[in-house]
Amino acid sequence: MAKTVKKKVKLPVPDAVPPARGKLPKAIRKAEAAALAPLAPARPSGDVAVLHRLWDTIEGRRVSGDAATSHSARLLKRGTAKVAQKLGEEAVELVIEAVAHNGEAIVGEAADVVYHLLVLLVDAGIHPSAIWGELERREGISGIVEKASRPRALMAAARTTKIP
């Protein structure tokens, strides 16, 4: 059997590479802007208040109950099991995109997870401020210490003696 010898091929460097200094050509800047636009935040300030507004909107849709015009109302009418299932599906989609290192899709799927988490909180009657309070309570505490401090009843209910 003959061995195949592979030659190293030196790829040519295109002449169109812009100089290190100065502006990129306008066509390249426009192409980059178009490619990066989906990753840019809609509001550069990125205020957490959007979560409260979204929770208020979902709660309003729950109260109105108009499943014909509102996805949130339709999902809430289907019950807690469906709300929880939908959150789980979105979480799996986020994990898949994270493993694939697909940044743009991660942003979209993470937004879906947050939305469906808020739907679940509305369904449970829990305002996001309760979550922020719990996060503040845990702030500065090691995750290992926090998990070790959880009641043993949780481990018994989970039928395990191991702390993950």
Image: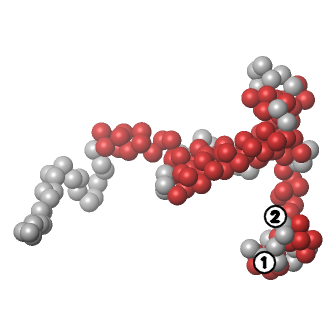
Q: Percent from the top left, x then y, of residue 35?
A: 41, 42
Please give the name of the residue rendered at 75% of the width and 43% of the height, measured from the top-left corner: 85
Q: Residues within 10 Å of mark 2 (few under 14, many from 20)?
A: few
- Side of 92 relative to 23 (left or right): right
- Side of 60 relative to 72 (left or right): right
Which quarter of the picture shows residue 34? Answer: top left
Please give the name of the residue rendered at 82% of the width and 32% of the height, measured from the top-left corner: 78
Please, what secondary structure does the residue beneath circle 2 have? helix
Along the polypeptide, which appears first: circle 1 or circle 2? 2
Residue nearer the viewer, 162 or 54: 162
Q: Percent from the top left, x then y, of residue 119?
A: 80, 41
Which residue matches tag 2? 135
**Residue 162, labelled with which disc?**
1
Please, what secondary structure does the residue beneath circle 1 have? loop
Residue nearer the viewer, 32 or 128: 128
Quadrant including the N terminus:
bottom left
- Looking at the image, can residue 50 be seen? no
Quadrant including the C terminus:
bottom right
